[in-house]
Image (cartoon, rainbow, N blue to C red):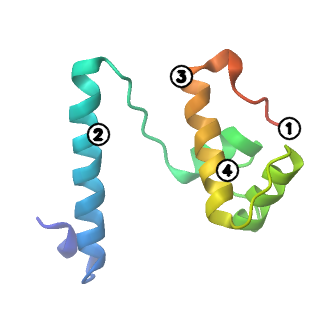
Amino acid sequence: MPSGAMLGAGNASHTVDFAWMLCGAVGAICGPYSVRMVRANVQRVRKSFTGQGRPPDPKKFIAAHCRMLGFEVTDHNAADAIALWHFQSGYIFGELALARAP
């Protein structure tokens, strides 16, 4: 069944298809080099970074947490990128990952 039928949406189905294809391509590249690929949803990344998976205003909360850690973020996209970097660095370099604030 095509993803568009599952979503009941028009162009959103193309986005879902592209996301799945991108995951497959990354997995195909990582496999032969023994690079571990870790899948995570948004709540898992937020919880890893801040200790809360579902804060009241996630965009502002993540940005404030970044500023508290000394990162100068200009928007929520930069804050999300730092949170994702933190999450992945914990898997790759566990002992060097930033400790999350209490």
Which quadrant would residue 38 be assigned to in this image? top left
Q: Quarter of the image containing the C terminus?
A: top right
For label 3, the SS is helix
Real-space CA distance between mark 1 and mark 2, rounded to the nearest whole angstrom? 31 Å
Q: Residue beneath label 3, please? A: 92
Task: Residue lying at the far left in this picture: please name it.
Answer: 1
Q: Is residue 58 left or right of residue 84?
A: right
Real-space CA distance between mark 3 and mark 2, rounded to the nearest whole angstrom? 16 Å
Q: Residue beneath label 1, please? A: 101
Q: Nearer the viewer, mark 3 or mark 4?
A: 3
Tell me the number on the disc at residue 53.
4
- Give amino acid for label 1: Ala
Q: Nearer the viewer, mark 1 or mark 3?
A: 3
Tell me the number on the disc at residue 16.
none
Q: Residue 37: x percent and y percent? A: 38, 31
Q: Nearer the viewer, mark 1 or mark 2?
A: 2
Tell me the number on the disc at residue 26.
2
Label 1 with label 4: CB-CB less than 8 Å: no
Label 3 Cα crowd, 10 Å radius (few <14 / some 14-19 / many 20+): few
- Give amino acid for label 3: Ile
